[in-house]
Amino acid sequence: MGRLLIRVCAAGLLLSTPVLAAQDLDLDVDLRAVSSDATPSRLDGGLGKLRYDAQHDGLRLGDLRLGYHGDLTTTLHVTAEAVAYGDHDVNPVDLTELYAEWRPIPVSAWRSRLKVGAFYPEISLENRMHGWQSPYTLSFSALNTWVGEELRTIGAQYNLDWLGRAHGHSVDVSLNAAVFGWNDTAGTVLAARGWGITDRQSTLFGRFANGGRPLLARTLFYDELDHRAGYSLGLNVKYAGRLEGRALHYDNRANPAVVAAAIQDTGWDTYFDSLGLRWTPTAEWTAISQWLHGRTYAGNVAPVNAWSYDAEFLLLSWRHGATRLSARYDRFATHQTTSDFYEYVDLYFGDRGHAWTLACDRQLNAHWNIALEGIELSSWVAQRALIGAAPQATERQLQLAVRYAL
Amino acid sequence: MDSKCALLAACVTACSILGATAPALAGAELSVTVTGSTGAPVAGAVVVAEPAQSKPHPRPGLKAVMDQRDLQYVPDVLIVQTGTEVEFPNSDNVRHQVYSFSPAKTFHLSLYSGHEHAAVIFDRKGLVTLGCNIHDSMVGYIYVTDSPWYGRTGTDGSLQLHDLAPGDYTVRLWHPLLNEAGPDLQTSLRVDEGSTGTAEFRLHRPLRPDPRSLGADKKWADY
């Protein structure tokens, strides 16, 4: 149903915009040379936490992205993001976002906005470029990797903005409230594989690469199982372009007692709170920190399986002219319990770890960009014992990206 | 000095320049300096000298341009006389949507690129704050005044206004990053023919941080 809705939206978009203006489109191609000693990747059915592993390094397609940002009327705007990753996905090309936004012209310091479609909840402070890409590093923080893997608001979001800067003040405030469906499987990846550090966003019609082992084979992203809407409530505050703070509470309100035979899975009742702060004291320096903590429940016989999870990171970035240097420290954990909060002792799933990411990015001209990124990630993953591997592992990945933007 | 005031009141002197060589109909001059709370000069302050007795008649045919470049209004502050036609070209390769809900001029220009819209006439004095409904970080100002005597302070915090008609004036101060209000942002003085008046303003509170100094990136989206 969710996919049908999105297909209808996509068809409507194409029919309503017979002529696409060149300035409404942006195209990125990202090619990479990768060296990795990581264990088999989470994208290839393994429990490695990085995008590439020792069997999948060399020359790779980072992504091929096509974005459309057009205007149906002067106050109704449309965004569509299509991407190809070349990681033997189910669909070679798929959508990551598709939404319309009504943005009326302000007549006072208060402005309402309404988004309808499939889009990101307002959590990330590092994924600020078109296509939800990061200007700081090639790979996202563990926290935002999960947001990209499992979270999309498919529904409607209302924003109430207070445009302080247009009213002679230094502060802008925005409240957001969203109601959504088709996110009843959020939490599946986190429980099964734990946190990861990649730049792979899940797609609206896709599976998680390679059929999703060890996920249940038929689990799709963005499924509606229980016909019960989820919600999120958030607050964004900006001060003079220098500080931006975000808070969000998310609850998909999925019913873990609902069994969906078609995908051999139950709903995953997932909720979390997140906080974030981005500080830009000068044009050269940026500091970003985010924190997220939540729980997810699955199963139809009480006490059901439950996981608590949390992740946080601190990123520092320095830009001088066309060069940007960034460093990020990530810390993360998932911990399996049961819904009555006793330890789960039969088949324990859980992970904990930390990672350092260093990146150097240089814009060569208006179209060409090169970026070098190194990650060292140490983690303990209980599930590794199930496949005969040592639970503790340190994984390293070095990537050189050559990117062309049209 | 009024203790409620956040400003040190402007110290104003007007002195005559006497001399047999002064031309009979030479206009007056006004020298203004603006310093911040630390004593450092304040650049970019808007200074307007409004005559008390006679209201200047707007001159017809005045035109000005407020450009949009690199996701910013250029200049950040445009000072115009009442009745001026202002054009809003868009020099970026993304669309902008200019709006203002300021009482002095409420208007909007629907989404556009290039030079799609006709000039807008600013026919009422006051401060007009400009926004862009697509890029919330874009903020600009149009300061509309009846007076033909205005300007912005340079990097040394000073401004010279020339050819003022002799008489009484109210000198007003404003800055886009001003963090205070009150009667000390204006002062009254008299300038006589062939004389130079001076006005000194000192702010008591630091200016607000300037978001424009951080720049903007067209590749950034509103996530």
Image (cartoon, coloured by chain):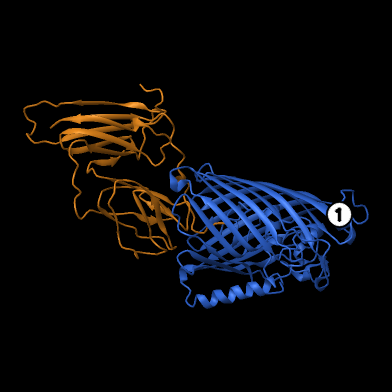
- Place of residue B160 in the rendered image (x, y in percent of width and height, measured from the top left): 24, 36
Q: Residues within 10 Å of mark 1 (few under 14, many from 20)?
A: many
Chain shown orange: that is: B
* B50 on left or right of A391: left
Q: Quadrant of residue B44?
A: top left
Q: Tell me the element at label 1.
A: helix
The correct choice, above or below, for A215 with respect to B70 in the image is: below
Taking depth in this image into account, of A363 and A387 the one nearest to the observer is A387
**Residue at x 23% of width, y 41% of height:** B149
Question: Image height check: is A94 above or below B118?
Answer: below
Q: Using the rendered view, name the quadrant where residue A200 is placed.
A: bottom right
Nearer to us in this view, B208 or A66: B208
Pick the quarter of the image with the N terminus of chain B.
top left
Q: Residue furthest right?
A: A346
- The x and y percentages for residue A128 are 57, 55
**Colour of chain A as rendered:** blue
Using the image, name the chain to which the residue with label 1 belongs. A
Residue at the disc numbered 1:
A382
Q: Amino acid at mark 1?
A: Ala
Task: Say if residue B2 shows up in the picture.
Answer: yes
Label tally: 1
The percent position of residue A109, horizontal first and vertical second, equals 47, 49
* Image point (39%, 64%), residue name: B113
A298 is higher (above) or lower (below) than B9: below
In the image, what residue occupies the spot 63% across and 75% down? A7
B155 or B192: nearer the viewer: B192
In the shown orientation, is residue B218 left or right of residue A138? left
Please name the residue shown 72% across and 74% down the image.
A90
Q: Percent from the top left, x then y, of residue A117?
A: 61, 66
